[in-house]
Image (cartoon, rainbow, N blue to C red):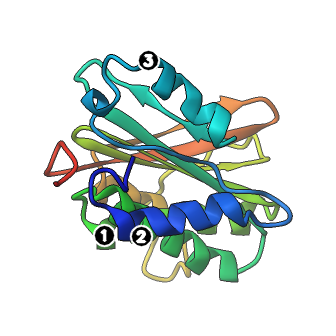
Amino acid sequence: MLRRRRGVLAARPLESAWNHPPQRHGPQACCCDQADSVQGDEEALARVPELHPGVEAAADASGWMRCRAAKWFAPEVASIRAARLFVAELLQAWEVDADLDDAALVVSELATNALCHVGTPFEVVVSSRPGCLRIAVRDASPLVPVAVEATSDDPGGRGLVLVAALTRDWGVDLEGPGKTVWADLATSVDRPRD
C-alpha cells in the first residue's frame, strides 16, 4: 500500500523487516493507507494479514487506516537506542507528523523503566490514528509505575514526569502477568501526506 501511495522509500524498511525477521522476536507491522484505496475490495483488505503474518490492517470510522507495529527488545542498554530508532523509522515510514524529539524521549523513558525496574525482554508497540500517536512498552512485571517528583539529589525518577509533560495522556494497562505503559502524543496532521 505504501508503494501505491508513492512511498517506495518508506515501504522498503517495512518489507525488509517482513522478509528478514530477527531470530528471537520478530517485528509486527501494519499497512497504513487511506482506506478508500481498497474500498469496494474487502477481499484485498482481508488478505493483508494472510499475506503478511503479524500485519494488521483496519479502517477506522473516519475512513483512514490505523497503523500499528510492535517489536521485542532484549534487556540491555543498547535496546534503548534501538527502540528510539524503531519509533523514528516508523514515524518516517507512516509519514506521521508528530514531534520526533518528544517521541524519542517518551520511548526512551518507557523502555528505560522496563530495563531498569524489570530487566526482562520488553516490547515496544507504536500505533497511529488520526490526531494521535501512541507509544507503549510492555514488560513482564505487574508493578505499576508512579510518577514522582524527584529531588535535585536523586539520580533518577524524573522519567514519568517528563512523559506526562510531553504527552496528552499516559497510563498503565495490566495484562496477564505483566503490564503495558502507554503514552499518547498529539499529531498535527491527521492524514498521511501524498
- The x and y percentages for residue 8 are 37, 65
Instruction: Specify whether 107 is left or right of 114.
Output: left
* Mark 1 or mark 2: whose residue is earlier in sequence: 2
Along the line of sight, the residue nearer the viewer: 51 or 166: 51
**Labelled disc at residue 88:** 2
Q: Are marks 2 and 3 in contact (CB under 8 Å)?
A: no
Label 2 element class: helix
Instruction: Specify whether 179 is left or right of 44.
Output: right
- The x and y percentages for residue 138 are 66, 47
| Residue 18 occupies quadrant | bottom right
Along the line of sight, the residue nearer the viewer: 9 or 186: 9
Along the line of sight, the residue nearer the viewer: 123 or 28: 28
Q: Is residue 157 above or below residue 70?
A: below
- At x 71%, y 30%, the residue is 175
**Labelled disc at residue 42:** 3
Q: CA distance from mark 1 to mark 3?
A: 34 Å
Identify the amino acid type marked 3.
Glu
* Mark 2 or mark 3: whose residue is earlier in sequence: 3
Q: How many marks?
A: 3
- The x and y percentages for residue 42 are 44, 17
- At x 33%, y 16%, the residue is 40
In the image, farthest residue toward the right: 24
Identify the amino acid type marked 1.
Leu
**Labelled disc at residue 100:** 1
Crowd band around label 2 with a 10 angstrom C-alpha radius: few (<14), some (14–19), many (20+): some
Label 1 element class: helix
| Residue 165 occupies quadrant | bottom left
